[in-house]
Amino acid sequence: MITVEGLSKRYPLGERPAVDKVDIHVRQGEFVAVMGPSGSGKSTLLNLIGGLDVPDHGKISVDGLSLHNLSEKRRTLIRRRKIGYIFQNYQLLSELNVKENIAFPMAMDRCPREEIQMRVQQLIHALDLKGKENSFPAELSGGQQQRVAIARALAMQPRVILADEPTGNLDRRRSYEVLEILSRLHREERLTIIMVTHDLSVAGCAERVLLFKDGRIESDIRQTEVNLQRALEDFLAELQA
Ligand SMILES: Nc1ncnc2c1ncn2[C@@H]1O[C@H](COP(=O)(O)OP(=O)(O)OP(=O)(O)O)[C@@H](O)[C@H]1O
């Protein structure tokens, strides 16, 4: 579903690559968490997979389509149609209301108006945003804003969700709600999810965890292989030692 081969990216002033010859294969419907210390390259990796940034070397394919050798215009199109992106700070458009934010990717893709209205209604219902349709982001709680952002990410019915610290700005309860939604999408709709997180308990919701350090994958742990929580705690203890 998502294949990354020999992926490298160095920023202009970086002493070493932010992402360094990384290989990953994520199967359709897998829920993968990416953990690692600050600056280890997690967001860079996600941005490369999502086509928000371009690698110096390596190949990326998402759902059978190569992303690394496309023009920016084509990459944007594929990103919009195949990938839903969720950010820590929601990145909603402040001048648009809830309905308009959710509709935005479909409007950009010139979907028919009735189709947009129907999909937005479905998502308002699914993400429990009834009554907030006409509110603006500044009038919503963090949890509600993230639910709008998830609805927007789902608008185009993508097969892949990339989430960069989706619970990073939320308290435990709101974080739990967001994780519930992601887990449900994974379970019921077989969406492929890659989620960057700092939080052990958040990573524990995924079935596989990639531990990142200095731009490389240190470990690739599957829930079924070992006690995930134990492996993650060991990794953190080692980093802190
Ligand atoms: N736009 C940029 N320009 C230059 N250097 C960058 C840029 N973005 C990230 N970096 C550098 O690349 C490295 C990896 O950054 P990245 O944001 O991918 O790490 P991260 O693991 O996501 O960190 P965090 O957990 O703190 O968000 C860091 O050394 C960072 O300073």
Image (cartoon, rainbow, N blue to C red):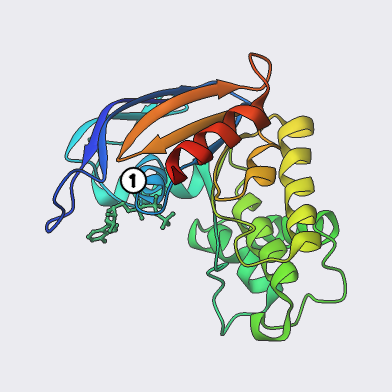
Tell me which residue sits at (79%, 32%) in the image: 188
- x then y, percent, for residue 138: 65, 85
Residue 207 in view of the camera: no
Would you place residue 60 above or below residue 116 in this image? above
Q: In this rendering, would 104 be left or right of 143?
A: left
Judged from the image, the quadrant occupied by ligand 1 is bottom left
Q: In this rendering, would 83 be left or right of 48?
A: right
Of residues 198 and 25, which is closer to you in this image?
198
Tell me which residue sits at (64%, 17%) in the image: 226
Q: In this rendering, would 60 be left or right of 235?
A: left
Residue lying furthest top in this view? 225
Q: In this rendering, would 144 be left or right of 54?
A: right
Where is the C terminus found, in terms of image quarters?
top left
| Residue bearing the label numbered 1 | 75
Residue 150 lies in what quarter of the image? bottom right
- x then y, percent, for residue 24: 40, 24
- x then y, percent, for residue 15: 13, 50
Residue 148 in view of the camera: yes
- Amino acid tagged 1: Arg
